[in-house]
Image (cartoon, rainbow, N blue to C red):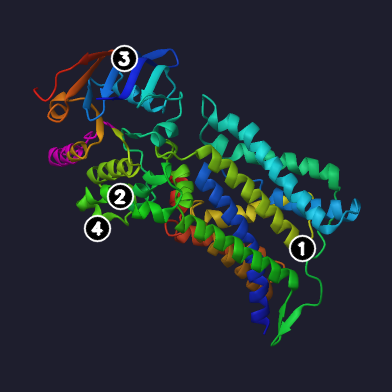
């Protein structure tokens, strides 16, 4: 197996506060990796540092290519797409427009985006969104918004999909549905990284776990057992 | 036929308001900054062409191209130097200061430079389409007015098609909706900000050139134009260029009809009373609540 993502000595700080300290871990192609740990311990900061949403120290390689610091657009173009915490949708745009903008990192043509396999796959995975596609994303329920966010991530045709707290604030049934979809995305061959406060749910799906305590990442090879 | 002629005059003024409203709201959609200098770019367009053509004696096409190029380069430099510091630095400034301050300051700066360069007299760019007003069934069409109307239709239509039917247009909307969300999707929010800023500055300058033969410009004309564009944009909640365009046309037509039928002197007063009453009666429908709550 080849390494999809290699993170070496990653540190992220906000002013004087160090959120992540020297995290080192590898995610192989085809893995489903859970990043777990209590709230406020730096899980999301790891993901934001890796994707380039915040500046970092240390090295990140995506499929062997060194990622430039602080450039989230580079990550999206090179196969690593983030589905961020709190979803970060465009509330006044329709759900369909939100999803199709995921294609922006590989095309500027709306026709090609609509006909593309990745857009079709993103729409097909969420049949429950069908009646709401023309609705403004800000007016959707929390679960529907999460689905739109994941679908937008998929439309970018990622090799690695990094999902930050996919079930935050969702009802149990909706959370299960989100995980069903994540499992299908993984089955279809996409490498997954899931940040999750409650490891129990994540470990039903993940074969690898990075445990984060006080900004320190501890690699734990176990998974699918807990 | 008084009504018809008033309507035509109103549509011409309205289309000017509409274009500036579209410029204000499209850029607000991208950057969440209100461009209060948009009228000043129009003034520079008109007086700049007049200066290069009449005072410096260069041919008209050269004057137009030079002026538009200067406006474009200046807008680009302003974005790179000032707006970049305000928005892209390690500490991103937000709120009322950014929304108004930087373009308001720019407006004063342009006025000052224009006063030194062009003086304080009323000037205008030379008419691009000379000749008598066209008459059709007792309706009068000023040639400059037709030119303004034509430009407004082309520019408004182009923006509409771009936002509605292209991925780039949707990306433009996404920039102002959610910067983080836009960057995650691979959208270069900074590039859109300067592109649209430069584009709207040049469009404003073009309008200044086309429209100035009708009204004439001084170095202070920019503020009035910005204000009317701003007002029409407000009727679209600053975020809906299509609605801002309709509001601009509506204000122009209403202004002409009030001036013609009610009172030439107090027409503007009645106009603003009606506009204020509309806001009070129907704030949500006109998009004012979304403008306030963001």
Provide the secondary structure element on which disc 2 rests: helix
First in sequence: mark 2 vs mark 4: 2
Q: Is residue B101 above or below residue B224?
A: above
How far apart are labels 1 and 3 at the CA level? Answer: 68 Å
Seen in the image, is B8 located left or right of residue A56? right
How far apart are labels 4 and 1 at the CA level? Answer: 52 Å
Identify the disc placed on residue A126: none
Q: Is residue B280 above or below residue B185?
A: below
How far apart are labels 2 and 3 at the CA level? Answer: 34 Å
Identify the disc placed on residue A24: 3
Counting other residues with Cα less than 10 Å from the Cα at mark 4, is it few (<14), some (14-19), or many (20 or more)?
few
Q: Percent x, y for residue B263?
A: 68, 72
How many marks are shown on the rendered structure? 4
* Quadrant position of the C terminus of chain B in the picture: top left
The residue pinned by badge 4 equals A131
* Quadrant position of the N terminus of chain B in the picture: bottom right
Q: Nearer the viewer, mark 1 or mark 3?
A: 3
Identify the disc placed on residue A117: 2
Q: Percent x, y for residue A200?
A: 13, 26
Provide the secondary structure element on which disc 1 rests: helix
The residue pinned by badge 1 equals B215
Q: Are marks 2 and 3 in contact (CB under 8 Å)?
A: no
Q: Nearer the viewer, mark 2 or mark 3?
A: 2
Look at the image and say whether residue B251 sits in the magenta stretch: no
Q: Nearer the viewer, mark 2 or mark 1?
A: 2
Q: Nearer the viewer, mark 2 or mark 4?
A: 2
In which chain is the residue bearing label 2? A
Q: Which residues are magenta?
A: A162-183
Q: Are marks 4 and 1 on the same chain?
A: no
């Amino acid at each position: 197996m080849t390494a999809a993502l290699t993170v070496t000595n990653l540190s992220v700080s906000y002013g004087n506060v160090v959120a992540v300290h020297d995290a080192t871990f590898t995610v192989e192609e085809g893995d489903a990796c859970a990043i777990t740990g209590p709230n406020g311990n730096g899980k999301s900061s790891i993901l934001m540092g890796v994707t380039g949403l915040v500046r970092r120290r240390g090295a990140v390689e995506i499929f062997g290519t060194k990622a430039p610091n602080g450039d989230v657009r580079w990550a999206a173009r090179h196969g690593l797409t983030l589905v961020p915490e709190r979803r970060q949708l465009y509330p006044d745009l329709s759900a369909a427009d939100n999803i199709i903008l995921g294609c922006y990192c590989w095309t500027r043509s709306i026709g090609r985006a609509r006909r593309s396999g990745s857009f079709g796959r993103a729409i097909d995975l969420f049949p429950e969104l069908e009646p709401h596609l023309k609705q403004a994303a800000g007016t959707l329920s929390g679960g529907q918004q999460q689905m739109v966010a994941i679908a937008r991530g998929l439309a970018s045709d990622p090799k690695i999909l990094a999902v930050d707290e996919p079930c935050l604030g969702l009802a149990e049934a909706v959370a299960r549905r989100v995980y069903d979809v994540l499992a299908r995305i993984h089955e279809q061959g996409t490498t997954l990284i899931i940040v999750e406060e409650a490891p129990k749910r994540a470990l039903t799906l993940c074969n690898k776990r990075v445990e984060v305590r006080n900004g320190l990442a501890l690699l734990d090879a176990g998974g699918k057992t807990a | 036929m008084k009504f018809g002629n008033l309507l035509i005059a109103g549509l011409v003024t309205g289309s000017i308001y509409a274009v500036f409203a579209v410029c204000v709201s499209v850029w607000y959609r991208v950057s969440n900054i209100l461009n209060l200098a948009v009228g000043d770019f129009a003034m520079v367009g008109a007086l700049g062409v007049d200066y290069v053509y009449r005072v410096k004696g260069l041919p008209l096409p050269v004057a137009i191209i030079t002026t538009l190029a200067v406006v474009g380069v200046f807008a680009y430099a302003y974005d790179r130097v000032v707006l970049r510091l305000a928005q892209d630095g390690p500490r991103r400034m937000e709120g009322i200061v950014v929304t108004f301050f930087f373009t308001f300051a720019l407006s004063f700066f342009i006025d000052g430079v224009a006063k030194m360069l062009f003086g304080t007299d009323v000037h205008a760019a030379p008419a691009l389409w000379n000749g008598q007003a066209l008459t059709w069934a007792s309706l009068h069409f000023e040639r400059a007015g037709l030119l303004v109307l034509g430009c407004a239709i082309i520019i408004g239509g182009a923006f509409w098609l771009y936002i509605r039917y292209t991925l780039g247009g949707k990306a433009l909307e996404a920039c102002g909706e959610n910067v983080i969300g836009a960057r995650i999707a691979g959208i270069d929010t900074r590039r859109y900000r300067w592109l649209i800023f430069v584009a709207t500055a040049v469009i404003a300058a073009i309008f200044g050139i086309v429209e100035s033969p009708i009204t004439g410009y001084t170095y202070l004309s920019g503020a009035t134009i910005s204000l009317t564009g701003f007002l029409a944009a407000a009727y679209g909640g600053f975020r809906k260029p299509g609605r801002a365009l309709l509001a601009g046309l509506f204000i122009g037509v209403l202004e002409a009809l009030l001036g013609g039928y009610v009172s030439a002197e107090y027409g503007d007063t009645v106009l603003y009373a009606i506009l204020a009453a509309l806001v009070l009666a129907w704030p949500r429908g006109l998009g004012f609540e979304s403008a306030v709550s963001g």
